[in-house]
Amino acid sequence: MNTKMELLKKGLLKKGIRPTYIRLKVLDYLETNRNHPTAEAIYKSLVKEIPTISRTSVYNTLNFFHEKELINILFITGIEARFDSNISPHHHFLCGKCGRIIDLDIECNYFKKGNIRGHRIIELHGYFKGICKDCLKEGK
């Protein structure tokens, strides 16, 4: 197993997760493709390398990773779940022209407070929608 896969394996073991081949491949895909992919995009990519993989295995792995707080699920598009292996606090920007989802590292006081008016914050999702700078340059 290559060094990257060994690191991913150690990371899963540290979280108490059994590092199965499919779990390692899904996590590797997410770490390599930081474009907030859908489960279907992950499946279509992995099935080329692992013809026996099922969509159910991919969905179950993604849900399990989310339960273990290894990834975040985004619902920014309103029509599909997207997956993000960057679990540090950050916001997202959805371009209405090209459809890209871009990480935004901007300051948000609520990430640090832990509660609002006595309500404990467990998750916070900050979504911005507009037109990205690349589409604006191209005049799309």
Image (tube, rainbow, N blue to C red):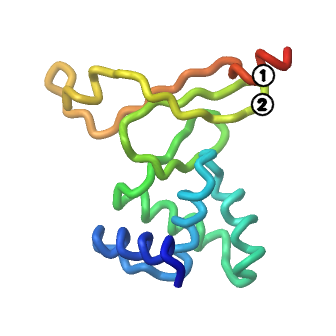
Residue 25 percent coordinates (x, y): 57, 72
Q: Which residue is mark 1?
A: 135
Furthest residue toward front: 3
Circles 2 and 1 in contact, beta carbons < 8 Å: yes
Residue under the image location 61 percent in, 71 percent down: 56
Q: Is residue 81 positioned above or below 103 on the image?
A: below
Q: Is residue 83 above or below residue 60?
A: above
When asked about the image quadrant of residue 26, the answer is bottom right
Mark 2 or mark 1: whose residue is earlier in sequence: 2
Viewer-proximal residue, 37 or 81?
Answer: 37
The secondary element bearing badge 2 is classed as: loop
- Looking at the image, the residue that sits furthest to the right is 139
Tell me which corner region of the image, top left, top right, bottom left or bottom right, holds residue 44. bottom right
* Residue drawn at 36 percent across, 33 percent down: 124
Q: Nearer the viewer, residue 23 or 135?
A: 135
Q: Amino acid at mark 2?
A: Cys
Residue on which the image places disc 2 = 98
